[in-house]
Each structure stands twice: as structure tokens, then as C-alpha cells.
């Protein structure tokens, strides 16, 4: 009986894989993302090896992700117009060519920091189109809307399983075959996701012939997101966490080499520990049966993210650093994925591409400013203190989100009732109770 129940639970956690297109996407991305993490670790280590500068680590991170902030809003408009499947095929082909270019420069021994900066900008432009299209395309791969939260959670588990495996392997590969070898492996790994995308059978979306000017549609998307408090507040929380919290990863090479007195292997272990916590968080989200209650989850895990960073900044031993990074990775992943799930659930379909582009801006587009700020601060006050400041900012953001949560629920409940997530009479009863006694917890 216990074995049958366990098997049933696992089937439930993997239910989105029952959809053919999503299963293809999941398998292809699982291979490609490991290569992506090889490149991330190898790039940061290469920049620090070539320059020895915390500031340049921040500059490279800034240049690589600034295009997401600048271009993603326009890419979101186009994601609502274009064939998202075709966009993803092209972005993966271009990303593969970018990795091969990095590999050629590194293996030939002529690579310099400015090469990395230029190619990071190119990858950033590619990502600016890839992320909104990818996030919006998830809905098209899932035939049953109730499996969408599970698909998003599995996306996160896939990303973080690669994040766990990639850095730990990268530490050994950098020592064995050099950074160029990691870039080359990453380039070939894109073939898996390109093949999976080409193998899909995608139903064409109904075309919308009433296109306005791109700027008009962009303004419409901004107005929609800003004037709907749940979307506005979730995006604000993500922006603060990405600006102040996630740049701790940029400073990892400094912590590994200066604080923990290690090399590329230690850097790999640190990033893998964060990936392990994120993977645990993804499994936790995949096991949930509904989007209900995700507001409380977001509050808790945002606070865990901040506390984990504070503890990591104070650690001077490898074991304690690994433990604190597991908590940090858990908090970061669950918060980001839960916010993604809420947004994907409540957004209007015609606005999906634009709202997910704003998600990209908040999640990744603010990171370059955080990377630049973190690099600048670390060069003056040290990496540990810089990480501590970021953790404190995330804790404050979690407290403010908790203060806003009761009023946000009042906006979301009618949408959940319309989608069948909660019974309509429950939503109306909650609303009536809130009028008499104030907002209640759900």
C-alpha cells in the first residue's frame, strides 16, 4: 500500500510530462542547461583569472544581462504576435553559435576580457527574445490548464538539476580541459534542445490581425501590469530580490578564492550547493496540488533567501558555507518559481507575452544593475559585507510583501473562482466576510 501511494505521488509530481510536447521540451532542455551552467561557471572563472578584478566580474555580468532589461519589453510584444515555437528554434541556434565563438577564442588562446564582454552582450540580446517566448510557450505545450503549475515547477527542477550538476562538473572540467573545453561542450549541448523543438507538433495560434504600433501595445501592457496590484506587487518583489539578492553569485569566485582559500573546484561546490537547495525547492513545488496558498509560500521563502545570504556572508568555513547556500538556493528558487506560477495563472492570455517579458525584466533584467552594484561595493567594502546587504534587503522586501498580501488576495480570488481553482461560492463568501471583518487569510 505504501509503495503504491509513493508511486502515485511520483506520477502526480511528474504529471506535466504526460503532455508530448512538454516531454520533448523537458528532455532537450535537461541536456542543454547542463552545458549552459558549464559556460556560466567557466566564464566567471575565466574573467577572474584574466583580470583578478571584482569590478570586472560585475561589469561582465552587467553587460551580459543589460539587454534583457532594455530589449525584453519589445520582445514581449513580439512574443504575443509571432510564432513562439519558431522564435525558440532561432534563439537556440543563435545561442549555440555564440558558445562556439567563445570556444574558438578560448581554445586558440587569444581570448581577452573584452571578447567575453562583447559575446555576453550578444547572448543577452538572444536571451531577451528567448525568455518571454519560452515562458509564454509553456502554456501551448500543456493541453490541460490545471497541469500548468506542475509544468512550471518541473521547469524549475530541470533548471536547478542542471545547476546542481553543471557547476560541480565544471569545476573539474575547467581544471581538465580549460574554459574553452566547457564552452565547446555547451555549444554541442544546444543540439538536444533544437532537435526536441523540431520534433514537436504545435497547433497554430489564432492570429490577431488587430495589431497596433509596437510602442502602443507596449504601453498597453505596462498599464495592464501596473494597474493590477497582484501583478505589480509580485514584479516589484522579484525586482528587489534580483537587484539586491541574486548578484551574490557574481561574487562567488571571490568567496571561493579569497575567503575559503580554494580554486575552481570550490567554486563548483558552492554553486552546486545553491543548486541543490533550488532542486529541493522545485521538488517541493512540484508536489503541491494547487496554486492556492502560494502567497504565504512566497513570503516565507523570500525571507529564507535573505537569511541564508546573511548566514553565508558570515561563514568562513566550507561546510557552513555549503549549508547556508542550500537554504539560499531553496529560498531563491521557490520564490521565483512561485511568482512565475501566480503570474502565469492570473494573466490574461492576450497579455501573456508582455507580462512574461516584464517578469524577465524583474527577474533577470535588474540583475545587471545588481551585478554592477555588487562588483563596485565588493571592491570597496568586501564581498561578504556586500552579500550581507543584499540578504537584508530581501528580508525587508519579504516583510513588505506580507503586509500587502491580504489585499492582494481580494483581487486574485475572483480569477481563481473563474478558473475553477476555488469554488465561486467560496470566493464570494470570502469577499463578504472581508467586508464585515477585514481581509482574512486563505
Image (cartoon, rainbow, N blue to C red):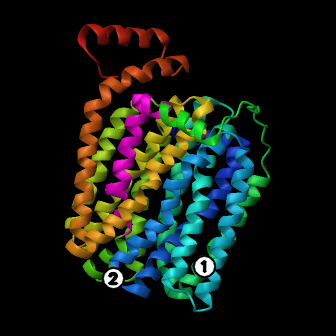
For numbered disc 2, what is the local secondary structure? loop
- Residue under circle 1? 102
Relative to 408, residue 6 above or below: below
Residue 425 lies in the magenta-colored region: no
- SS assignment for the magenta stretch, majority: helix
Seen at 45% across and 80% down, the residue is: 47
Question: In front here: 290 or 349?
Answer: 349
Seen at 37% across and 33% down, the residue is: 295
Seen at 57% across and 55% down, the residue is: 128
Percent x, y for residue 401?
Answer: 30, 37
Question: In front here: 193 or 107?
Answer: 107
Q: Does the image show residue 272?
A: yes
Relative to 178, residue 401 above or below: above
Answer with mark 1 or mark 2, whichever residue precedes in sequence: 1
Q: State which mark lies toward you, 1 or 2.
A: 1
Q: Neighbour class for label 1 at 10 Å: few (<14), some, many (≥20)?
A: many
Seen at 38% across and 56% down, the residue is: 329
Residue 234 lies in the magenta-colored region: yes
Image-quadrant location for residue 217: top right
- Residue under circle 2? 262
For numbered disc 1, what is the local secondary structure? helix
Dividing the image into 4 quarters, which one contains the C terminus? top left
Percent x, y for residue 121?
Answer: 55, 68
Q: Is residue 206 left or right of residue 347?
A: right
Asked if the residue at tag 2 contacts the one at tag 1, i.e. Cβ–Cβ closer than 8 Å, the answer is: no
Relative to 136, residue 406 above or below: above
Percent x, y for residue 327?
Answer: 32, 55
Question: In front here: 265 or 63?
Answer: 63
Percent x, y for residue 113?
Answer: 48, 82
Image-quadrant location for residue 236: top left
Span colored in magenta: 224-250
Amino acid at each position: 500500500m505504501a509503495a503504491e501511494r509513493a508511486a502515485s505521488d511520483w506520477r502526480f509530481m511528474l504529471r506535466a510530462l504526460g503532455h508530448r510536447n512538454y516531454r520533448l521540451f523537458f528532455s532537450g532542455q535537461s541536456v542543454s542547461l547542463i552545458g549552459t551552467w558549464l559556460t556560466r561557471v567557466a566564464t566567471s572563472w575565466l574573467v577572474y583569472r584574466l583580470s583578478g578584478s571584482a569590478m570586472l566580474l560585475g561589469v561582465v555580468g552587467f553587460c551580459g544581462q543589460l539587454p534583457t532589461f532594455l530589449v525584453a519589453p519589445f520582445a514581449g510584444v513580439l512574443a504575443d504576435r509571432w510564432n513562439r515555437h519558431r522564435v525558440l528554434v532561432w534563439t537556440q541556434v543563435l545561442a549555440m553559435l555564440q558558445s562556439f565563438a567563445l570556444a574558438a577564442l578560448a581554445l586558440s588562446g587569444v581570448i581577452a576580457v573584452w571578447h567575453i564582454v562583447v559575446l555576453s552582450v550578444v547572448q543577452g540580446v538572444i536571451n531577451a527574445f528567448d525568455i518571454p517566448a519560452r515562458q509564454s510557450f509553456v502554456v501551448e505545450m500543456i493541453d490541460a490548464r490545471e497541469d500548468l503549475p506542475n509544468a512550471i515547477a518541473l521547469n524549475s527542477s530541470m533548471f536547478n538539476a542542471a545547476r546542481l550538476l553543471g557547476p560541480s562538473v565544471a569545476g573539474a572540467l575547467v581544471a581538465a580541459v580549460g574554459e574553452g573545453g566547457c564552452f565547446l561542450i555547451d555549444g554541442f549541448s544546444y543540439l538536444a534542445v533544437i532537435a526536441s523543438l523540431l520534433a514537436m507538433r504545435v497547433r497554430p495560434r489564432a492570429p490577431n490581425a488587430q495589431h497596433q504600433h509596437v510602442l502602443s501595445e507596449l504601453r498597453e501592457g505596462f498599464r495592464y501590469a501596473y494597474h493590477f496590484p497582484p501583478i505589480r506587487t509580485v514584479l516589484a518583489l522579484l525586482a528587489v530580490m534580483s537587484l539586491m539578492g541574486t548578484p551574490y553569485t557574481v561574487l562567488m569566485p571571490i568567496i571561493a578564492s579569497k575567503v575559503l582559500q580554494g580554486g575552481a573546484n570550490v567554486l563548483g561546490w558552492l554553486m552546486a550547493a545553491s543548486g541543490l537547495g533550488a532542486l529541493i525547492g522545485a521538488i517541493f513545488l512540484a508536489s503541491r496540488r494547487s496554486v492556492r496558498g502560494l502567497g504565504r509560500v512566497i513570503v516565507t521563502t523570500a525571507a529564507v533567501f535573505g537569511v541564508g545570504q546573511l548566514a553565508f556572508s558570515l561563514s568562513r568555513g566550507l561546510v557552513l558555507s555549503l549549508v547556508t547556500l542550500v537554504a539560499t538556493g531553496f529560498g531563491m528558487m521557490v520564490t521565483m518559481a512561485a511568482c512565475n506560477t501566480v503570474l502565469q495563472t492570473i494573466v490574461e492570455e492576450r497579455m501573456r507575452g508582455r507580462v512574461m517579458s516584464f517578469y524577465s525584466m524583474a527577474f533577470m533584467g535588474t540583475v545587471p544593475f545588481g551585478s554592477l552594484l555588487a562588483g563596485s561595493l565588493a571592491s570597496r567594502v568586501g564581498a561578504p559585507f556586500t552579500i550581507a546587504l543584499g540578504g537584508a534587503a530581501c528580508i525587508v522586501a519579504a516583510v513588505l510583501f506580507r503586509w500587502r498580501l491580504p489585499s492582494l488576495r481580494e483581487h486574485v480570488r475572483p480569477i481563481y473562482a473563474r478558473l475553477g481553482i476555488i469554488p465561486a461560492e467560496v470566493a464570494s463568501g470570502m469577499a463578504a466576510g472581508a467586508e464585515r471583518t477585514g481581509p482574512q487569510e486563505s
